[in-house]
Amino acid sequence: MSRVPLIGVCACTRQIGHHGFHIAGDKYLRAAAIAGVPLVIPALGELIDRQSLLESLDGLLFTGSPSNVEPHHYQGPASEPGTPHDPSRDQLTLPLIREAVDAGIPVLGICRGFQEMNVAFGGSLYQKVHEAGPYQDHRERPEDPVEVQYGLSHALHVQPGGLLARLGLPAEIRVNSLHGQGVERLGAGLRIEALAPDGLIEAFSVEAAPGFALGVQWHPEWKVHEHPAYLALFQGFAEACKARAAQR
Protein backbone atom coordinates (compact mmCIF):
# COMPACT_ATOMS: atom_id res chain seq x y z
CA MET A 1 0.00 0.00 0.00
CA SER A 2 1.45 3.37 -1.04
CA ARG A 3 2.14 5.93 1.65
CA VAL A 4 0.31 9.27 1.58
CA PRO A 5 2.87 12.07 1.08
CA LEU A 6 3.60 14.36 4.03
CA ILE A 7 3.73 18.02 2.99
CA GLY A 8 5.48 20.55 5.21
CA VAL A 9 3.85 24.00 5.20
CA CYS A 10 5.92 26.77 6.75
CA ALA A 11 4.29 28.86 9.47
CA CYS A 12 4.47 32.56 10.18
CA THR A 13 4.70 33.97 13.69
CA ARG A 14 1.95 36.20 15.02
CA GLN A 15 1.30 37.93 18.30
CA ILE A 16 -2.31 37.50 19.43
CA GLY A 17 -3.04 39.22 22.69
CA HIS A 18 -0.24 38.47 25.12
CA HIS A 19 0.97 35.33 23.39
CA GLY A 20 2.91 34.31 20.30
CA PHE A 21 1.49 31.85 17.79
CA HIS A 22 2.71 29.95 14.74
CA ILE A 23 0.09 30.08 12.00
CA ALA A 24 -0.51 28.98 8.42
CA GLY A 25 -3.31 30.22 6.20
CA ASP A 26 -6.28 27.94 5.59
CA LYS A 27 -6.14 28.37 1.80
CA TYR A 28 -2.54 27.16 1.67
CA LEU A 29 -3.26 24.12 3.81
CA ARG A 30 -6.27 23.14 1.72
CA ALA A 31 -4.25 23.49 -1.48
CA ALA A 32 -1.35 21.52 0.04
CA ALA A 33 -3.84 18.73 0.78
CA ILE A 34 -4.00 18.13 -2.99
CA ALA A 35 -0.49 16.72 -2.65
CA GLY A 36 -0.83 14.91 0.67
CA VAL A 37 -1.24 15.46 4.40
CA PRO A 38 -0.26 19.04 5.35
CA LEU A 39 2.01 19.47 8.37
CA VAL A 40 2.52 22.99 9.74
CA ILE A 41 6.18 23.65 10.50
CA PRO A 42 6.65 26.19 13.31
CA ALA A 43 9.09 29.04 12.68
CA LEU A 44 11.41 28.07 15.51
CA GLY A 45 14.69 28.67 13.73
CA GLU A 46 17.58 26.75 15.27
CA LEU A 47 15.22 24.77 17.51
CA ILE A 48 14.20 22.83 14.40
CA ASP A 49 16.49 19.97 13.40
CA ARG A 50 16.25 20.66 9.69
CA GLN A 51 17.94 17.46 8.59
CA SER A 52 15.53 15.28 10.56
CA LEU A 53 12.63 17.35 9.29
CA LEU A 54 13.66 16.92 5.66
CA GLU A 55 14.10 13.19 6.10
CA SER A 56 10.44 13.04 7.20
CA LEU A 57 8.88 15.11 4.40
CA ASP A 58 7.79 14.40 0.83
CA GLY A 59 7.25 18.05 -0.14
CA LEU A 60 7.51 21.62 1.15
CA LEU A 61 5.19 24.56 0.56
CA PHE A 62 6.50 28.04 1.36
CA THR A 63 3.47 30.29 1.68
CA GLY A 64 2.61 33.91 1.22
CA SER A 65 2.49 36.18 4.26
CA PRO A 66 1.75 39.75 5.37
CA SER A 67 5.46 40.01 6.27
CA ASN A 68 8.47 40.60 4.04
CA VAL A 69 11.95 39.08 4.04
CA GLU A 70 14.28 41.28 6.07
CA PRO A 71 16.41 43.18 3.52
CA HIS A 72 19.74 42.50 5.20
CA HIS A 73 19.44 38.95 3.84
CA TYR A 74 19.95 40.32 0.31
CA GLN A 75 22.09 43.36 1.18
CA GLY A 76 19.17 45.69 0.54
CA PRO A 77 18.55 49.07 2.16
CA ALA A 78 16.67 49.16 5.45
CA SER A 79 12.90 48.87 5.20
CA GLU A 80 10.66 51.81 5.91
CA PRO A 81 9.49 52.02 9.53
CA GLY A 82 6.40 49.90 10.09
CA THR A 83 7.24 47.34 7.39
CA PRO A 84 6.11 43.93 8.69
CA HIS A 85 8.91 41.39 9.11
CA ASP A 86 9.14 37.87 10.52
CA PRO A 87 12.78 37.17 11.41
CA SER A 88 11.90 33.81 12.96
CA ARG A 89 10.45 32.66 9.65
CA ASP A 90 13.48 33.98 7.74
CA GLN A 91 15.78 32.07 10.08
CA LEU A 92 14.05 28.80 9.25
CA THR A 93 13.03 29.11 5.63
CA LEU A 94 16.08 30.65 3.96
CA PRO A 95 18.44 27.75 4.79
CA LEU A 96 15.65 25.17 4.56
CA ILE A 97 14.89 26.06 0.95
CA ARG A 98 18.41 25.35 -0.25
CA GLU A 99 18.67 22.16 1.79
CA ALA A 100 15.32 20.87 0.52
CA VAL A 101 16.17 21.57 -3.12
CA ASP A 102 19.59 19.93 -2.77
CA ALA A 103 17.94 16.87 -1.20
CA GLY A 104 15.52 16.54 -4.12
CA ILE A 105 12.45 17.27 -2.00
CA PRO A 106 9.70 18.91 -4.08
CA VAL A 107 9.44 22.62 -3.27
CA LEU A 108 6.71 25.11 -4.17
CA GLY A 109 7.06 28.76 -3.15
CA ILE A 110 4.16 31.22 -3.33
CA CYS A 111 4.41 35.04 -3.02
CA ARG A 112 6.64 35.50 0.06
CA GLY A 113 7.79 31.93 -0.51
CA PHE A 114 8.76 32.87 -4.09
CA GLN A 115 10.70 35.84 -2.78
CA GLU A 116 12.35 33.67 -0.10
CA MET A 117 13.47 31.24 -2.81
CA ASN A 118 15.04 34.07 -4.80
CA VAL A 119 16.89 35.38 -1.73
CA ALA A 120 17.97 31.86 -0.72
CA PHE A 121 19.68 31.53 -4.11
CA GLY A 122 21.45 34.87 -3.80
CA GLY A 123 18.92 37.13 -5.50
CA SER A 124 17.58 40.49 -4.36
CA LEU A 125 14.15 42.12 -4.12
CA TYR A 126 12.48 45.36 -5.03
CA GLN A 127 10.88 46.56 -1.82
CA LYS A 128 8.43 48.73 -3.76
CA VAL A 129 7.80 47.38 -7.23
CA HIS A 130 5.46 50.27 -8.08
CA GLU A 131 8.34 52.73 -7.59
CA ALA A 132 10.88 50.69 -9.58
CA GLY A 133 11.48 51.34 -13.24
CA PRO A 134 8.79 50.41 -15.74
CA TYR A 135 6.66 48.27 -13.46
CA GLN A 136 2.99 48.70 -12.76
CA ASP A 137 1.45 48.64 -9.30
CA HIS A 138 1.01 44.94 -8.49
CA ARG A 139 -0.64 45.52 -5.11
CA GLU A 140 -4.23 44.75 -4.24
CA ARG A 141 -6.48 47.52 -2.90
CA PRO A 142 -7.14 46.89 0.80
CA GLU A 143 -10.59 48.42 0.55
CA ASP A 144 -11.74 45.93 -2.09
CA PRO A 145 -13.66 42.78 -1.12
CA VAL A 146 -11.41 39.71 -0.95
CA GLU A 147 -13.03 38.26 -4.08
CA VAL A 148 -11.93 41.35 -6.00
CA GLN A 149 -8.45 41.36 -4.46
CA TYR A 150 -7.88 37.78 -5.62
CA GLY A 151 -9.61 38.27 -8.96
CA LEU A 152 -7.72 37.93 -12.23
CA SER A 153 -5.58 41.04 -12.59
CA HIS A 154 -3.14 40.75 -15.48
CA ALA A 155 -1.81 38.45 -18.16
CA LEU A 156 1.05 36.05 -17.51
CA HIS A 157 3.45 35.16 -20.32
CA VAL A 158 4.65 31.58 -19.83
CA GLN A 159 8.15 31.05 -21.23
CA PRO A 160 8.57 28.15 -23.67
CA GLY A 161 10.45 24.98 -22.81
CA GLY A 162 10.24 25.27 -19.02
CA LEU A 163 8.53 23.57 -16.13
CA LEU A 164 5.28 25.54 -16.48
CA ALA A 165 5.04 24.56 -20.13
CA ARG A 166 5.66 20.92 -19.21
CA LEU A 167 2.84 21.16 -16.68
CA GLY A 168 0.55 22.05 -19.56
CA LEU A 169 0.15 25.79 -19.08
CA PRO A 170 -0.53 27.68 -22.32
CA ALA A 171 1.64 30.55 -23.51
CA GLU A 172 -0.62 33.07 -21.80
CA ILE A 173 -2.93 32.86 -18.78
CA ARG A 174 -4.39 35.44 -16.41
CA VAL A 175 -3.47 35.58 -12.74
CA ASN A 176 -4.21 37.54 -9.58
CA SER A 177 -1.77 40.12 -8.20
CA LEU A 178 -1.37 40.95 -4.50
CA HIS A 179 2.25 41.90 -3.89
CA GLY A 180 4.27 45.02 -3.23
CA GLN A 181 7.71 43.44 -3.50
CA GLY A 182 9.25 41.44 -6.33
CA VAL A 183 12.39 40.03 -7.89
CA GLU A 184 15.08 42.59 -8.66
CA ARG A 185 18.18 40.42 -9.27
CA LEU A 186 17.36 36.81 -10.08
CA GLY A 187 19.12 34.27 -7.88
CA ALA A 188 21.89 32.05 -9.24
CA GLY A 189 20.68 28.97 -11.09
CA LEU A 190 17.07 30.12 -11.38
CA ARG A 191 15.26 29.93 -14.72
CA ILE A 192 12.58 32.46 -15.59
CA GLU A 193 9.31 30.60 -16.14
CA ALA A 194 6.83 33.46 -16.57
CA LEU A 195 6.72 37.24 -16.89
CA ALA A 196 4.08 39.89 -16.30
CA PRO A 197 3.32 42.20 -19.26
CA ASP A 198 5.56 44.85 -17.69
CA GLY A 199 8.51 42.43 -17.61
CA LEU A 200 8.40 41.62 -13.89
CA ILE A 201 9.43 38.04 -13.12
CA GLU A 202 6.36 36.12 -11.95
CA ALA A 203 7.71 32.56 -11.81
CA PHE A 204 11.00 30.71 -11.84
CA SER A 205 12.30 27.17 -11.45
CA VAL A 206 15.62 25.89 -10.10
CA GLU A 207 17.43 24.65 -13.19
CA ALA A 208 19.75 22.08 -11.62
CA ALA A 209 17.31 20.86 -8.95
CA PRO A 210 17.10 17.07 -8.76
CA GLY A 211 13.37 17.41 -8.03
CA PHE A 212 10.40 19.74 -8.52
CA ALA A 213 11.41 23.28 -7.46
CA LEU A 214 9.12 26.14 -8.52
CA GLY A 215 8.36 29.62 -7.22
CA VAL A 216 5.40 31.78 -8.30
CA GLN A 217 4.64 35.36 -7.36
CA TRP A 218 0.87 35.14 -7.70
CA HIS A 219 -1.55 33.11 -5.54
CA PRO A 220 -2.57 29.85 -7.26
CA GLU A 221 -3.86 28.47 -3.95
CA TRP A 222 -6.85 30.83 -4.13
CA LYS A 223 -9.89 28.82 -5.26
CA VAL A 224 -7.42 26.46 -6.89
CA HIS A 225 -10.10 24.04 -8.14
CA GLU A 226 -11.80 26.82 -10.11
CA HIS A 227 -8.71 27.74 -12.16
CA PRO A 228 -7.25 24.99 -14.40
CA ALA A 229 -3.83 26.65 -14.64
CA TYR A 230 -3.62 27.07 -10.87
CA LEU A 231 -4.66 23.47 -10.35
CA ALA A 232 -2.05 22.26 -12.84
CA LEU A 233 0.70 23.72 -10.61
CA PHE A 234 -0.53 21.85 -7.56
CA GLN A 235 -1.10 18.66 -9.52
CA GLY A 236 2.49 18.81 -10.78
CA PHE A 237 3.69 19.41 -7.24
CA ALA A 238 1.49 16.52 -6.04
CA GLU A 239 2.91 14.10 -8.60
CA ALA A 240 6.44 15.00 -7.53
CA CYS A 241 5.52 14.51 -3.85
CA LYS A 242 3.96 11.12 -4.60
CA ALA A 243 7.11 10.06 -6.44
CA ARG A 244 9.22 11.18 -3.48
CA ALA A 245 7.01 9.22 -1.07
CA ALA A 246 7.29 6.12 -3.26
CA GLN A 247 11.09 6.40 -3.23
CA ARG A 248 11.11 6.56 0.54
Image (cartoon, helix red, strand yellow):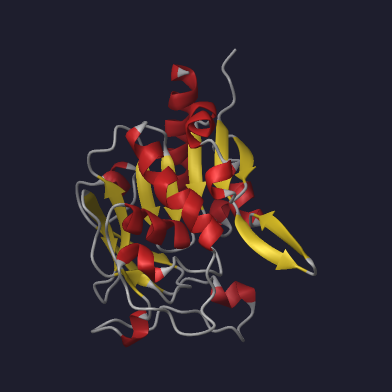
Choose between 68 and 152: the one closer to the eye.
68
Which quadrant of the view contains residue 115? bottom left
Q: Residue at x 56, y 60 (%)?
A: 222
Above or below for 9 versus 88: above
Give how far across and how far down residue 76 sits, in percent: 32, 73
- Looking at the image, which is closer to me, 84 or 112? 84
Residue 194, quarter of picture: bottom left
Is 61 rendered above or below residue 227?
A: above
Q: Compare residues 47 and 84 and report the one nearer the observer.
A: 47
Task: Please state the total of marks drawn on the protein image.
Answer: 0
The percent position of residue 15, horizontal first and vertical second, equals 71, 66
Task: Identify which residue is drawn at 29% across, 48% down.
Answer: 205
Residue 23, percent from left and from top: 67, 56
In the figure, is residue 165 to the left or right of 154?
Answer: left
Residue at the image point whose x is 27% and y is 61% from the top: 123
User: Looking at the rendering, which quadrant does residue 183 occupy?
Assistant: bottom left
- For the N terminus, the image quarter is top right
Task: Decide if residue 204 is on the left or right side of residue 221.
Answer: left
Q: Is residue 45 visible?
A: yes
Residue located at (43% from left, 25% from top): 243
Q: Position of 69 compared to 131: left or right?
A: right
Residue sticking out furthest to the front: 46
User: In the depicted view, which residue is nearer to us: 160 or 87?
Assistant: 87
